[in-house]
Amino acid sequence: MSSLLLALLFAGPSIEGLTIADGRRAVLSVTATVVTEAAGEVRLEGDVNGRPVLLARRLPKAGAKPVKFRLDPRSLGILAPDVPLRFALDLVVEETGGARAEEAVERTLPVPLAVLHGLGQEVSPGALEDFAAGIDLASPSDWSAEGVRPDLLLHHYRTVGPSLPALGKAFAKALKRFVKKSGFGRADVVAYSMGGLVTRSAMTQGAGGLVRRVVFTGTPNEGTPVAYLGVAASDFGMAGPVPGVDPALADLLLDPAARTTLVTFFPTYPWHDPFPVLLEPLLPDPEGPLAALNALGPVAGVDYHAISYSGPGTVEYVDSADILLLLGSGLLSPEQLAGVLMAMADGAGDGVVPLRSVFLRDEPAWSGALTEHDLGPGTHTALPEDPAVLATIAGILDL
């Protein structure tokens, strides 16, 4: 082929079919086809979190050649990171005569994320996936909830029956496996409602050093008076369909095993008892598993955040579906029952979990350890779907 024809066919080197993929252990793979009209060199250069990168391969002759670079941050001395990995690179093709082409290779690998659901959500397939996808959509990063992801753990667990320590132990094991496979040193955790208590229990059972940040989303850290209604429903043998409530969820929470679980959520904080004679058996439980967990205080070295609504303590801000589900014997009207609940809750909240409980305001050991995110009026069941909540989570996680 004449030099004139080569000049017409090739205006210089080119890069075709550039693919950037991140796999397990936070390794970045870059593949492409480079086309040159002379011998030269192809390089991957730039930095990862400020550490310089220079990988090069010779191109001994003109033509098209597939190339692949595999960049493991460990080769740069980045071992078990607990911050996002930011790859700021260029794929450069340079011919011996000086002609060159380049394309940017940029990717951010976020700290691995574990997501936990709340009470009863194991009967709602896809609930966790929707929550995780919502966090992803609220963020500008390359993190994705789609497909099989080494940086995402959707932790499903059976909420009714197992004790809180047992649930925490199981999550601790799952988190250890997850972090080990990820290539990072620690993970972030976003936990909705009961999931926050499971997370805290896991952190006291060997998983504390594996968590960078934890976000409690409507978590009853100091319990909730609504749990009394659940126990009453169990004791009175409430059965049958509940308006506005998923029948599978109603059946789950009315299972006899639910009583043990709900007792875990009895309030641990002091509150004003409006009916001393009637409610004397329902005083805060200072000896229960939740009180024991709170007494341990926060695990050092973890960044704690909590998100809650703070609607005024009125009937309007009570989750009607939750109240109907937990009515119990029906001796009180929904309005009367809601009034009792709000009196027991003794403060603002999302209608199911008091604000003070989510923010651990009655626990001196937690003073100053938790960043509060009060999003104003709202209801408990809306938390995982609220764009404001999802955007707040994304901001906390540096996504």
Image: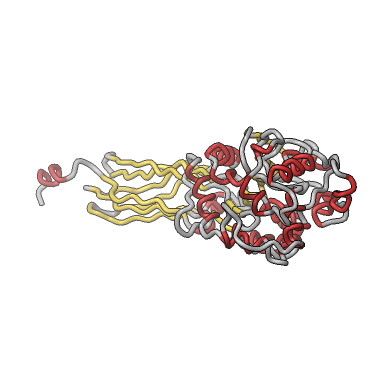
Return the residue nearer the eye: 194 or 145: 194
Image quadrant containing the C terminus: top right
* Residue drawn at x 80%, y 37% as measured from the top left: 367
The structure residue drawn at horizontal position 62% and vertical position 62%, both measured from the top left corner, is: 240
Q: Position of residue 353 (x, y in %)?
A: 71, 44
Q: Is residue 299 visible?
A: no
Q: Specify the color scheme.
A: secondary structure
When asked about the image quadrant of residue 153, the answer is bottom right
Left or right: 152 in relation to 372: left
What residue sits 31% from the left and 43% below the top?
A: 94
Q: How many marks?
A: 0
Residue 172 seen: yes
Residue 305: % across, % down:
68, 41
Q: Position of residue 349 (x, y in %)?
A: 70, 38
**Closer to the camera in the image, 107 or 247:** 247
Q: In this rendering, would 44 be left or right of 251?
A: left
Along the line of sight, which residue is nearer the eye, 303 or 169? 169
Q: Is residue 347 above or below residue 108?
A: above
Position of residue 336 relative to residue 233, above or below, is above
Whole-percent x, y for residue 141 in the image: 48, 42
Report the side of 342 relative to 320 (left or right). right
